[in-house]
Amino acid sequence: MASLVGQKAPLFRAKAVTNGGEVVNNFSLDQYLGKKHVVFFFYPKDFTFVCPTELHAFQEKLKEFESRNCAVVACSTDTEQSHWGWLQMEKKAGGIKGITYPIVADTTKTIALNYGTLSGDYDVDDDGNLIATGPMIAFRGLYLIDKEGTVRHQLINDFPLGRNVDETLRMVDALQFFEENGEVCPANWTKGSAGMKESHQGVADYLGKH
């Protein structure tokens, strides 16, 4: 699937577990439109090894994201019951107890499919239904979505490669810096550094509209 950068984030409604144990129906990223930036990330499966390190790493930095008015939302193809059970397990036992941001249950696999991060062997029939010929789980996909619902940054890692949460924060800072100052961010830019003014106004206008 082609990159989603510059496009509207695919819409969905699904069950999710919030606040460490509350199951909600019809969870949607629409609730953040016009209000917050969103970091929406996929992980392969509950009750695994690398995944909890990422989930806890995002929780440890959650206040940093919130201070930037940015929501963090996770998603995997497990059920909401599986999410809930994992959330009850202590960290030392391999669980994710203490995670408070929402975890979406993509049990139909269609959210991961629409975001282009679904792995496994599958086909789609004439009615748009997935036909599985093997296990279907999500790669480590991550999407930074602006307040207008547009994807501004996309990253997809293979299963063995955990993500860098500080880099995700840096991308949030870079996007917000551009939105606030109209200046672009050069290589290795960090918060507090100077930006660059775009020399071609037409390109700057284009960037400002997307």
Image (tube, grey):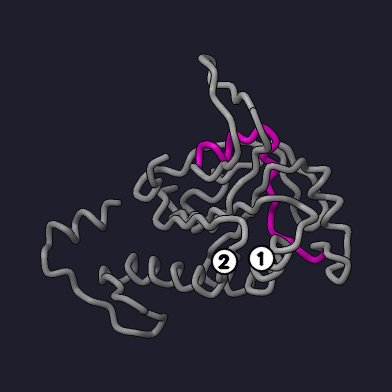
User: Is 107 placed above or below 97 here?
Assistant: above
Residue at 68 percent across and 42 percent down: it is: 77
* The label number, if any, that marks residue 163 in the structure image: 2
Looking at marks 2 and 1 on the same chain, the residue that comes earlier in the sequence is marked by: 1
User: Is 91 placed above or below 110 here?
Assistant: below
**Farthest top residue in view:** 126
Residue at 43 percent across and 72 percent down: it is: 173
3 vs 205, left or right, is right
Residue 36 image offset from top left, x and y in percent: 51, 58
Residue 111 image offset from top left, x and y in percent: 58, 38
Residue at 54 percent across and 51 percent down: it is: 32
137 vs 113, left or right, is right
Label tally: 2
Is disc 1 placed on a helix, strand or loop? Answer: helix
Query: Amino acid under label 1?
Result: Glu
* The label number, if any, that marks residue 54 in the structure image: 1
Query: Amino acid under label 2?
Result: Arg
Frontmost residue, 192 versus 1: 1
* The label number, if any, that marks residue 135 in the structure image: none
Residue 66 image offset from top left, x and y in percent: 59, 68
**Magenta residues (range):** 97-115
User: Is 133 placed above or below 191 here?
Assistant: above
